[in-house]
Image (cartoon, grey):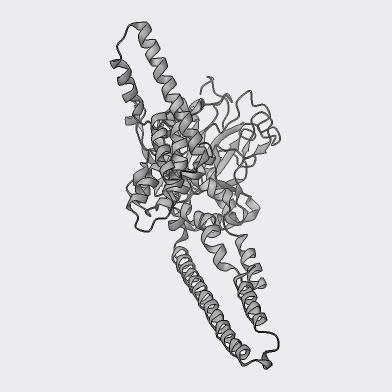
Amino acid sequence: MTTFACWCACVAILIQMVQGEMFTSLAAMQSAIWAEGEIAATIKDYIQEEEARLDKLKQLAADMHSHSNRVLKNPEQYLGNPVNAYLLIKGFTIDWDRDITGELAPIKPDLEERIQDLKESLPSYEDLNGAVVALLRLQDTYKLDTDRIAGGDLQGLPSVSLTADDCFELGRVAYHDLDYYHTSLWMEVALNKLDKEVNKTVHRKDILDYLSFSVYKEGNVNYALTLTEELLTLAPDNTRAQNNKRYYKKMINDRAAEAKRVSSQRGETGEDIVEEKEEEVEVKHERKLDDYRKSEEFATYEKLCRGEETHVYKHKHRLVCRHFTNNMHPLLVLCPMRLEEIYLDPYLIFFHQALSEYEMSVIKDLATPRLNTATVRNPETGVIETASYRISKSAWLKDDDDMVIRRVNSRIQAATGLDMTTAEDLQIANYGLGGHYEPHFDFARKEETHAFKSLGTGNRIATWLTYMSDVEAGGATVFPYIGVKIFPEKGGAAFWYNLYKSSEGIYNTRHAACPVLVGTKWVSNKWIHERGQEFRRPCGLHPNE
């Protein structure tokens, strides 16, 4: 029943109280006057409550209008900050359902329908989960301190300070993903934030509830018991906490008894047991990694993303920069390319200012309405599908879409000397919050027999990768096997061969797109295939030529 309906019911009861043969009694008439005064007071109370609710709605509308105007002045800069993106999505999901939905009722049916239609364009809880996972990925890859992120520091770049509730929700989403490592980190920061807040944004008992179980799952049983006991002082009727407390105590006692039994068998004193127990109190948060993420390749990939040096390149002194016309190609004679050698074997080069500002703008405008979640080709089946190791949105552009696409493809052909007839369409990729592509090969290995079978143009002989935006932090292209890292430079393009002249794969070209820390990353890929290159890049005398 709505508030207005409740007030109407009260008024109806008061009216019924004075109904009857009032004209026969002066006292009954006086009661009617008293009832009239009560009705007036009741209506006034209702009006005051409605005015207070409307004042909240006015403030809410003003805040939303101010926020949207501020963001729309430079949406890429604002949303390029992962903390801003997370808070925006949180505001339209958790905060909306908790703080706004109640204030909107009751409203006119047509207005409610209009708001519901507009909400279709707002982020969902699935988006919230994705934003949290992306933010945690950035935290791991770039070794960002949890306290510093919460305090508004992203690797030295200014950001927004988080509230205790903001930190709590990050931890809560991680908890539901069974990610107890990040749950513990963020719940501990939420507790610290809460202690400093005058207007508390979250209940302490809620934080303790998640934190106590998470640290237990990490193996910190003593700490879990301490937190659970504090939780029970705030919520003594919490049955789960009561059961957990008994379980933790039993586990600690069983461990102590086992330690005592082992030490007794070895003839050791009880002092050793005390030292063991003291060590057990130390709280350790350890990032849980699967087998691949424990590998040397993945460790090297993350180091390169952070800009660390992982390899010593002894031929670095031989690398040169030069103007390049590719044997006086007609398109490059008057406007030579600015070529920089990055690596010699495999031959990896970078063309500065390969695309103009106008060309990049046209390509982005053409691609934006076509962007869909990026896919990969399953190496076993050849089927196109999405994958968790590639997070971005992509679109494909053909020569027929615009003369700019034809011009760009012609320039790539002039610079590489390769035929674009059998190349794949120009792929445009946009990496947003935490967007990345883990280490992979562009070419199909021998066992991946179905990878490009449907295209009928052979394997990918070479890759041309153009950066169409600068990235404030992160977003590098890295080659873990050779220790090369290329940070995005707007208008620049990297080029490398994926295959030797013998069509054998060049395995040192395995590469990855690092997560975007701050900013947005636009790239275009041109994957060039074997067919049509027989006379442009003929076989050599040696297998690895």
- Residue 220: x percent and y percent? 41, 30
- Residue 334: x percent and y percent? 45, 51
- Mark count: 0
- Residue 34: x percent and y percent? 56, 86
Q: Nearer the viewer, residue 320 or 253?
A: 253
Residue at position x 58%, y 39% from top?
A: 527
From this view, report whether residue 254 is shown above or below residue 19: above
Residue at position x 55%, y 77% from top?
A: 46
Q: Which quarter of the figure has residue 316?
A: top left
Does any portion of residue 391 appear in the rendered image?
Answer: yes
Does any portion of residue 356 appear in the rendered image?
Answer: no
In the image, taking residue 373 as reference, residue 320 lies left or right, namely left
Q: Nearer the viewer, residue 120 or 237?
A: 237
Residue at position x 41%, y 38% from top?
A: 229
From this view, report whether residue 350 is shown above or below residue 311: below
Q: Nearer the viewer, residue 235 or 476?
A: 235
In the image, taking residue 489 as reference, residue 48 lies left or right, namely right
Q: Nearer the viewer, residue 337 or 525?
A: 525
From this view, report whether residue 437 is shown above or below residue 121: above
Work out which quarter of the rendered image holds the N terminus and state it: bottom right
Residue at position x 56%, y 64% from top?
A: 102
- Residue 486: x percent and y percent? 41, 39
